[in-house]
Amino acid sequence: MGTHAAVRDAGRGAAGATRASWALPLFLGLVYGGYAAFMARGTGPLTGANVLFGVLCGLVLAALAYGVGRIGKVLDAGPRAFSYAVVFGSAMGFLHSLADGSVLGSVVLGPALGAAMLVATYYALSTRPVKPVRYHARALPSGRK
């Protein structure tokens, strides 16, 4: 009895997402949300509003990171690097604004860090070899190996 042509890879969910595709954005969201809550708290006591603010910031960043990770797989190196740079620069500019920095400082720091991320990500994405799509031998039609 033959197997179905669509053999699922180990470690992939129903939608084809690996554990890392949701675990890494979740971890980044937790760290970012915790730090944003800490920065918003300042020197005052920890309140429910601070926790809610941190959770919301973490959820927004996790959703953006997950979306960029999923959409980025179909983009070329330039647009993919730009999307990572926009998310990173915006997130860092927002954290700088929470640190009682000036608006001008946040407006300068966010795009500057985003530009650095753009250069680094574009270099990393354009210099590595493209991996060919790999199939399971069982998933190939009979006679082809």
Image (cartoon, grey):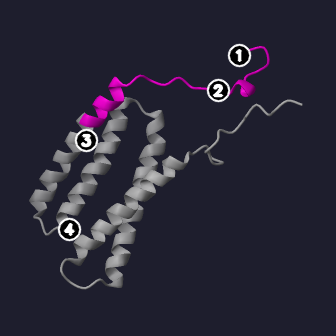
Q: CA distance from mark 3 to mark 4?
A: 21 Å
Q: Is residue 91 magenta?
A: no
User: At label 2, which amino acid type do we have?
Assistant: Tyr
Q: For the residues carrying marks 2 and 3, which lies nearer the camera in this image?
A: 2
In three-dimensional space, the C-alpha distance between marks 4 and 1, rounded to whole angstroms, equals 57 Å
Nearest-to-viewer mark from 4 and 1: 1
Amino acid tagged 1: Lys
Q: Residues within 10 Å of mark 2 (few under 14, many from 20)?
A: few
Element type at marker 1? Answer: loop
Q: Circle 4 is placed at which residue position?
A: 98
C-alpha distance separating marks 2 and 4: 47 Å
Is the N terminus in the top left, top right, bottom left or bottom right quadrant? top right
Amino acid at dot 4: Leu
Identity, as a three-letter code, of the amino acid under mark 3: Met
Q: In this rendering, would 7 be left or right of 40?
A: right
Q: Quadrant of residue 117?
A: top left
Q: Which residue is mark 1?
A: 145
Give the Cα distance between marks 3 and 1.
Answer: 41 Å
